[in-house]
Amino acid sequence: MSAGIGEAGEIAEGLTSGPAQVIAGMAKRRKLNRNPDHGKGLLKRLAGGTAHSVTSENGEPEKYVLMNFEVSWEPLPDATVEALPDATRDRMDELFELVHAKPKKAVQELRDLIVLHPDVPCLRNWLIHCLRAGSKADRREAMVLCQELFRRLPDYFFARTTLADLWLDEGAVDKAAELIFAPGCVLTHLYPERKVFHISELRHWFYLSGRIKILLGELGAAESYRDLLDQLEPDSEAVRHLNLMLKSDHSLLMRFLGKMRKA
């Protein structure tokens, strides 16, 4: 599952400042730091820091130990899901595939499950994902649901990152940036008791960080996030998409607009 981190340097600073911890409140909204060189020294420390991987018998990664927390490819415990009946959990495994392959077909079943199990946040996140792939009205509903989810559960990782994604869909780059880059939006500050993050959390966080930086015209910072993600998941769709964005004419325009914004 995925998460939000902060300026590239703030990520590194968070990683080196002590063990990670679970879920603080929402970060205060302050003026964004738009300096593309912010934290580059810390990024270098991150790149050169203590890290090693653990692989399974077939050579697939199981976890990646980076500084003082681990990145895991194995499913992480979720008490809200574990409390569900066995049959529901089994159906959720199947539904997860449907959510990504044919999201429109999963909408009604997710609505029904949320009525039965209103305290399982991942079900709401899946519904938001499905609605995002639908009509304009569906996308409006997705935004309303996600804002409500983030208001109710500010510590739920995907409430923050999915809301940032939805703001980017609407072209509200500054609103997305506040969720990811505002002071205090560092993994180890937002989730100070956590020592393990799932690869899907970091994938979403680094991808959003890179995408936002491209749209702000800060391509050097975007490349740093792309490189961090490439270190963890070199063949991921997120890395390929960031590479396409960085190589496109659009990124050159964003660089120019970014310079104009700072002028």
Image (spheres, grey):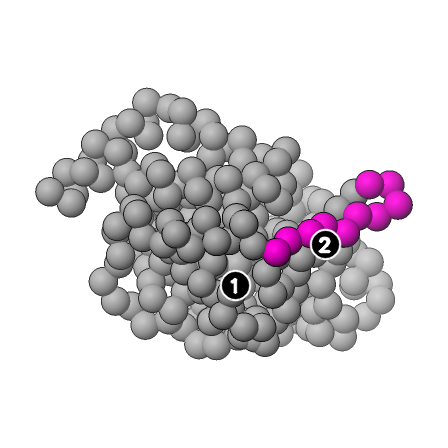
How many numbered discs, if any? Answer: 2
> In this image, 52 relative to 163: left or right?
right
The residue tagged 2 is 63
Rendered position, 7 above or below 256: below
As measured in the structure, the alpha-carbon distance from the residue carrying label 2 to the one carrying label 1 is 16 Å
Q: Nearer the viewer, residue 83 or 213?
A: 213
Q: Nearer the viewer, residue 237 or 151?
A: 237
The residue tagged 1 is 15
Region of the chain picked out in magenta, as a range: 50-59
Neighbourhood count class around disc 1 (C-alpha, 10 Å): few under 14, some 14–19, many 20 upward = many
Q: Nearer the viewer, residue 94 or 249?
A: 249
Q: Secondary structure at mark 1?
A: helix
Q: Secondary structure at mark 2?
A: strand
Name the residue: 37% across, 43% down.
221
Neighbourhood count class around disc 2 (C-alpha, 10 Å): few under 14, some 14–19, many 20 upward = many
Question: Residue 88 lies in what quarter of the image?
Answer: bottom right
Rendered location of residue 102, percent (x, y): 64, 39
Q: Is residue 180 visible?
A: no
Name the residue: 18% across, 38% down.
259
Name the residue: 34% across, 66% down.
183
Rendered position, 239 above or below 89: above
